[in-house]
Image: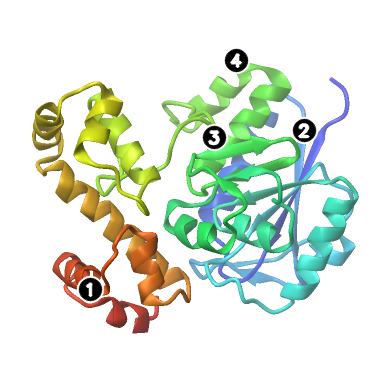
Amino acid sequence: MQGGKRFAFLLVDKFPMFSLTAAIDVCRSANRLLGQDFYSWTTVSPDGEAVAASNGLPLKVDYAIADLPPADILFACVALNLDFPGKSKVLAALRAWGRRGGALGALSVGSHLLAEAGQLDGYRCTIHWENRAGFMERFPEIDCTGNVFEIDRKRYTCAGGTTSIDLMLEIVRSDFGTNLANGVANQFQHERIRSAGDRQRVGPERDLTGKSEKLRRIVELMADHLDEPRSAVQLAKAAGLSVRQVERLFLRHLGVTPGRYYMRLRLERARELLRQTNMPILDVAIATGFTSHSYFAQSYRLQFGRPPSEERRTTY
């Protein structure tokens, strides 16, 4: 067995510990099953100082970003708050890494940092569903799919959490085949290895597994067209059903009409934009398919019990 792979993980204060450990433990388990330390990993921070995870646990790192030795992939694992000390130094390092042809990855919100550094231009990527709306408004030219993970040439991104496992398992599968990937998944009781084609969440229910395939298709169509909502006839036609059949489908599986469900999707996207961006409220309304500011405000209050302006004033 020749060579080996070395991964580097860039960490800043309040990074998501689970996303990091999920990725590293796949490598550890693969080494155990291989009987050889094929995969290795190292950690870096902006200045080489220890960082604290979002759960408060401190973690010493091996290097400062400027001193990082060669690695096969450099993964960004960062906090929800992307304004951290040493950020300009990190962005410069990521740009230099990319110019040298190095592979870059991101766990969860790390995709935002790569995009800021200009390292996702022309690449397909993904990000945690909660941050996708803000990402797409900030970087409209980047193809952010909303899938659980994406591998596009030398860019490896995932939505964080358990999707870190799926991304790393895909790397293991590419290196050693399906049997080893399945063996590692079994070690973690990971029942199904998701592919890059698996979507994250596509609605308020978070999970439509086991429900009608036509229902899922309609919900995905809704989620992809929040700024210009599709009509009931268009949605039904896309699924090969009548409008009445679509209504029955939603009532049976979700207990709500298609129109009400679509409205919830649009308002959830609006809330994400209000929390994640500085877009004017009218622009948020337009981006979620509302042509009237007053109708948007009224609908928002009915759904969330507060007006959009109050949401904007709330700190999360």
Identify the residue under disc 4: 179
Front: mark 3 or 1: 1
In this view, 88 is above or below 16: below
Residue 41 place in picture, x, y as percent: 75, 46
| Secondary structure of the residue carrying numbered label 2 | loop
Q: Amino acid at mark 1?
A: Ala
Residue at the image point whose x is 45% and y is 31% from the top: 190
| Secondary structure of the residue carrying numbered label 3 | helix
Q: Check whether the beta carbons of the residues at disc 3 and disc 1 lie within 8 A of each other.
A: no
Q: Amino acid at mark 4?
A: Asn
**Which one is in front, 22 or 313?**
313
Front: mark 4 or 1: 1
Q: Alpha-carbon neighbours of circle 3 within 10 Å: few (<14), some, or many (≥20)?
A: many
Residue at the image point whose x is 62% and y is 50% from the top: 142
* The quadrant where residue 17 appears: bottom right
Residue 37 place in picture, x, y as percent: 77, 33
Alpha-carbon span between mark 3 and mark 1: 39 Å
Q: Is residue 22 visible?
A: yes
Q: Amino acid at mark 3?
A: Asp
Alpha-carbon span between mark 2 and mark 3: 20 Å
Identify the residue under disc 1: 297
Q: Which mark is residue 240?
A: none
Q: Alpha-carbon neighbours of circle 4 within 10 Å: few (<14), some, or many (≥20)?
A: few
Q: Check whether the beta carbons of the residues at disc 2 and disc 3 lie within 8 A of each other.
A: no
Q: Alpha-carbon neighbours of circle 1 within 10 Å: few (<14), some, or many (≥20)?
A: some
Identify the residue under disc 2: 37
**Which one is in front, 76 or 294?**
294
